[in-house]
Image: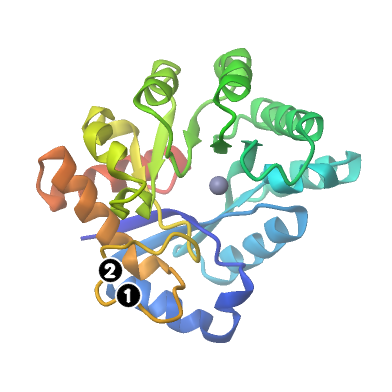
Amino acid sequence: MQLIDIGANLTHESFRHDFDDVLARARNHGVARMVVTGASREGSEEALLLARAHPGLLYATAGVHPHHAAEYDDAVDARLRELAHEPEVRAVGEAGLDYFRHLSPREAQLAAFERQLAIAAELGKPLFLHQRDAHEDFLALLRRWRDRVPAMVVHCFTDTREALHDYLALDCHIGITGWICDERRGSHLREFVREIPADRLMIETDSPYLLPRTVRPQPSHRRNEPMYLKHICEEIARDRGEAVEVTAANSTVTAEAFFGLA
Ligand SMILES: [Zn+2]
């Protein structure tokens, strides 16, 4: 089984002390490639350096998460444009809207998101997107930009069936994390994850966040890492009523096509 973790925050400080071990454990657990999320200007620079240091194993995205939208200015925009030209950078983002945590003002979020949509459109790059409690505004921007961007993945999808079908109608890809392994808050996803076409479904850990609750025993440190991706794949396979090998193979082919990894 050769899995691809399309969303791993490997620049997070919690990985600094044992980074090489994290990568080794991932490979030993069938995770052949990982896309390191860039969520700020500095984080995107670091993600690129990690990808350069591990060719063929790590790739990167370059973007500014809505939490950091207030930092988005012309200099950041110019640097993101440069980063997006680097061969290791396979998508623009993480970008989008988050009205749940609301760490940046709404106007700043909308502006930063639209400028990153413009970068993806100009450079012909796919987008790695985040949406929480902001479906209506998010969908309106996707509708305005969809025809100009080659592909979009709504990462860590946790929203409703209606939101899912709004995104699928725009031919978006969907990223599923260990949220689906959480019987307390992810059970709605289990009911409709089978409605995502195989060629639109990708899997991700969102490490170090969202440790799957199906990992037994739960590690005491609570840190998630790419080695646990198979737990997410197994839960999705169960909910889709298909063999885990099928979910694994399809999600890998889909991620290869999305990020140009083949
Ligand atoms: Zn996110």
Tell me: residue 103, above or below residue 258. below
**Residue at x 56% of width, y 33% of height:** 133
Secondary element at image label 2: loop
Question: Looking at the rendered structure, which numbered label has been put on residue 215?
Answer: 2
The residue depicted at 33 percent of the width and 45 percent of the height is 186
Amino acid residing under circle 1: Gln
Amino acid, disc 2: Val
Residue 105's spot in the image, x, y percent? 79, 37
Rendered position, 9 above or below 139: below
Q: Give coordinates of residue 72: x percent, y percent.
A: 83, 42
Q: In this view, does 220 lie above or below 71?
A: below
- Left or right relative to 210: residue 203: left
Q: Are marks 2 and 1 in contact (CB under 8 Å)?
A: yes
Q: Residues within 10 Å of mark 1 (few under 14, many from 20)?
A: few
The residue closer to the viewer here, 13 or 209, is 209
Q: Mark 1 points at which residue?
A: 218
Colouring method of the image: rainbow
Find out if the beta carbon at label 2 lies less than 8 Å from the nearest ligand 1 atom: no
- Of all residues, the one furthest to the front in this rendering is 184
Residue 64 at least partly seen: no
